[in-house]
Structure formats: C-alpha cells, structure tokens
Image: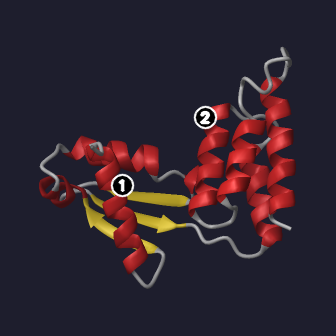
Amino acid sequence: MARLSDIIEAFIKELISETEQSELEIQRNELANQFSCAPSQINYVLTTRFTIDKGYYIESRRGGGGCIKIKKIIYQEHKPLAQVINERIGNNITYNTALQLISGLLESGKISEREYNMMKIAVNDRTLAGILEDRNKVRADILKGMIMVAML
C-alpha cells in the first residue's frame, strides 16, 4: 500500500502534467483537507519531493490558506543543462543529493532508466568504498562526467 506522501506526490505531479504551462498554484489547506491530513504533511511532500534537484521550484505565500506555486524547471538545450548540473553538483556531492539529482533527470526524461541505474551504482558509497578521502569530490567528478556524456 502506498504511503500518503507518495499519493500526494503523484496527485500533484498529475495536476502539473495536466496544465498547459509547467506551473501549478495550489492552496495548502485545501490540499490538506482533500487528503485528510495536516498542512505540515503537504509541506513535507513539497520540501522533500519537489526540490530543485528533482527539477522543481517552489514559491510559497503565507496567509490566506498558504498559496503554493510549483514550477517544473524546463531545461533548454544541453549547454544550459550542463551549466545547471555543474553549478548544482559543485566540487562535491553526497550520495543522497546525487540520487535526488539523477532521479529528477530520469523523471524529466533527460536520461533513461538504464543510465539512471548505471549512475546510481557508479556514485554509490559501496562502489566508492576504497576512497577514504574526498569521496564526495570523486563522486561529483564521476557524476558530472556521466551526466555530460548522457546528454550528448
């Protein structure tokens, strides 16, 4: 059985896919009422499942039920995407952040399921177990290289 967070995430993604723009405006309290949950549950889903790493930008307005605007980031061509990836990864990246990033690329259709799985294994802590110092730097270098090749 799916968790409530998974159900809310799927619902929001469905709403975004139904809009003609890549943008959705929702009321936090209305959504919480619809799913019979606390508004903090909606906040949790938004802050963990709709991050920049996953290809989303959130704007939140206080008052009046808590209006939230969710924007799906549309990457132009490979050069801007490469620039965004380099900026986001930086000089080092943790496994969890790397996983969020490549999950976002998979969801947006920028990489295939096979590429996703290869990247996930390549940057895994077990794969990098022999690297004692600067593991997150090595992970960042590997991930940047793999993403750039996948985008060619």
Residue in the image at 83% along x and 69% along y: 79
Return the residue found at the far top: 132
- Front position in the image: 5 or 74: 5
Q: Crowding at label 2, few (<14), some or many (≥20) Cα neighbours within 10 Å?
A: few
Gap in Å between the C-alphas at discs 1 and 2? Answer: 19 Å
Q: Secondary structure at mark 2?
A: helix
- For label 1, the residue is 9
- For label 2, the residue is 96
Query: Could you tell me if the residues under marks 1 and 2 are in contact, i.e. CB atoms within 8 Å?
Result: no
Q: Secondary structure at mark 1?
A: helix
Reply above or below: 17 against 52.
below
Reply above or below: 133 against 151.
above
Horizontally, is 101 left or right of 130 in the view?
left
Q: Earlier in the sequence, mark 1 or mark 2?
A: 1
- Front position in the image: 44 or 59: 44
x, y percent for residue 122: 78, 38
Residue in the image at 82% along x and 48% along y: 144
Horizontally, is 16 left or right of 130 in the view?
left
Disc 1 marks a residue whose amino acid type is: Glu
x, y percent for residue 5: 31, 45
Reply above or below: 112 against 122.
below
Horizontally, is 64 left or right of 149 in the view?
left
Residue in the image at 30% along x and 54% along y: 8
